[in-house]
Amino acid sequence: MSYSDQQIFDTLARFFAQEATGREGAIAVAPDTDIIGEGLVDSLAIFKLIAFVEETFGVTIAPDEVLLENFQTLRAVRNLIVKKLPA
């Protein structure tokens, strides 16, 4: 299946909105928001995000791809997803 950048960004932003339930205030995550630096992702949330990406987009994230630079921003996650999607 093919996804536009906006579809990927919107899907990832919804993940963070759902994960933020119970936190104070709404969370708006832009494509270049530093999700790790902002504290939106911790070690447990990274694995939840990986599971969400794998299930939602039908890709597999290899252990050697679980790197800070692949999960720093939604744009980085999007780049990883696009790389993994069938051509």
Image (spheres, rainbow, N blue to C red):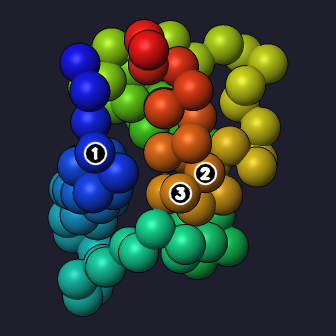
- Which corner quadrant of the image does residue 85 belong to? top left
Query: Are the residues tagged 3 and 2 within 8 Å (C-beta)?
Result: yes
Task: Return the disc, 2 or 1, that comes first in the chain's sequence.
Answer: 1
34 displayed left or right of 58: right
Q: Residue furthest front?
A: 87
Q: Residue at x 44, y 14 (%)?
A: 87
Name the spot of residue 43 as percent of width and height, x first: 63, 44
- Residue position marked by numbered label 1 in the rendering: 4
Q: How far apart are labels 2 and 1 at the CA level?
A: 15 Å
Q: Residues within 10 Å of mark 1 (few under 14, many from 20)?
A: few
- Residue position marked by numbered label 3 in the rendering: 75
Q: Residues within 10 Å of mark 3 (few under 14, many from 20)?
A: many
Name the spot of residue 75 as percent of width and height, x first: 53, 57
The disc label shown at residue 33, or none: none
Name the spot of residue 39 as percent of width and height, x first: 58, 70
Query: What amino acid does circle 3 point to?
Result: Arg
Asked if residue 72 is positioned above or below residue 33 in the image, the reply reads: above
Q: For numbered disc 3, what is the local secondary structure? A: helix
Q: For numbered disc 2, what is the local secondary structure? A: helix
Q: Residue at x 66, y 13 (%)?
A: 62
Query: What amino acid does circle 1 point to?
Result: Ser
Instruction: Work out whether residue 8 can be spotted.
Output: yes
Q: Residue at x 67, y 73 (%)?
A: 37
Of circles 1 and 3, the one toward us is 1
Q: For numbered disc 1, what is the local secondary structure? A: loop
Query: What amino acid does circle 2 point to?
Result: Ala
- Residue position marked by numbered label 2 in the rendering: 76
- Which corner quadrant of the image does residue 13 belong to? bottom left
